Amino acid sequence: MSVAALLLLADGRFPAGGHAHSGGAEAAVRAGRVHDTASMAAFLTGRLHTTGLVTAALAAAAAAGQDHDLLDAAADARTPAPALRVTSRRLGRQLLRAARAAWPHPGLDRLAAAHPRGAHQPVVLGTTALAAGLTPGQAAAAAAYESVNGPAAACVRLLGLDPYEVTAALARLAPHLDAVAGEATEAAALGDPDALPAASAPLLDVYAEQHRSWKVRLFAS
């Protein structure tokens, strides 16, 4: 296990393109559902236990060396909104480029060859974790953290929230992050892509489709 590699992979400055995406926060802000730190925290909690759980389980399964084609199909089935499918594959393509530079590995090369238009981001994240010497649990933790950290950073920009208060909100989510990562790792250990969590967040799907149609927006998604 490499704690340093985990920190690098979870760092928002890792050049995987995540900084350009709000994870649905921009649409939630425009809809008035997120307007202060408390409503942001509620949004992040819901996102973590739905989208975050699903991506964490997929990442853990990929980090365990499970078949990436089956996992990519499982990710596709768990991403009903076309806009989110496009975003996930775009982010997967960007992450794979950064990962192959940082941790050259045959698994990453095979993933790139099998999915030239981009595999789903959590599948790439898990394969990257494997290449970096991380455990499935660490991959799940990185995915769970990513599911809330990116939208939280977006809320600072969108609403001008106090970054100290936003950081405190993320810190209070720590037990939830640990629980989600643990649940995702246990599900991945079953070795069956069909048994992975399929928690849904319909409003995020609706937001994604609405956001894609906007002519003026700060974030790509």
Image (spheres, grey):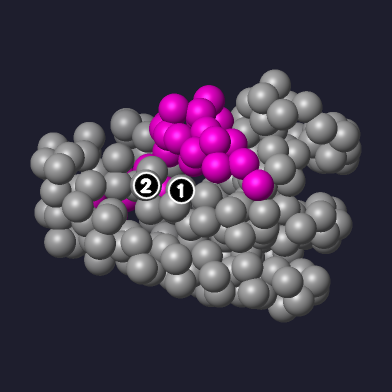
Disc 2 crowd, CA 10 A, few/some/many (<14, 14-19, 20+): many
Q: Please, is residue 138 above or below residue 192 in the view? A: above
Q: Position of residue 59 (x, y in %)?
A: 65, 55
Residue shown at the point (38%, 69%) measured from the top left: 176
Query: Is 10 a magenta residue?
Result: yes
| Left or right of 70, for residue 118 | left
Q: Looking at this rendering, what residue extends furthest in the top direction?
A: 101
Q: Position of residue 100 (x, y in %)?
A: 73, 27
Residue 52 visible from this viewpoint: yes
Give the total of numbered labels. Answer: 2
Residue shown at the point (74%, 55%) measured from the top left: 62
The magenta segment: 1-29
User: Quarter of the image holding residue 220?
Assistant: top left
Q: From the image, tell me which residue sits under label 2.
A: 149
Residue shown at the point (46%, 72%) measured from the top left: 179
In depth, the one of 89 and 107 nearer the eye is: 107
Query: Is 196 a magenta residue?
Result: no
| Left or right of 155, for residue 64 | right
Q: What amino acid type is highlighted by mark number 1? A: Glu
Residue shown at the point (84%, 40%) measured from the top left: 107
Q: Which mark is residue 221?
A: none
Q: What amino acid type is highlighted by mark number 2? A: Asn
User: Quarter of the image holding residue 110?
Assistant: top right
| Left or right of 197, for residue 153 | left
Disc 2 on helix, strand or loop? helix
Q: Position of residue 216 (x, y in %)?
A: 32, 31
In depth, the one of 162 and 159 nearer the eye is: 162
Disc 1 on helix, strand or loop? helix
Q: Please, is residue 127 above or below residue 65 in the view? A: above
Q: From the image, tell me which residue sits under label 1.
A: 146
Does the CB distance between marks 2 and 1 fall below 8 Å?
A: yes
Residue 9 visible from this viewpoint: no
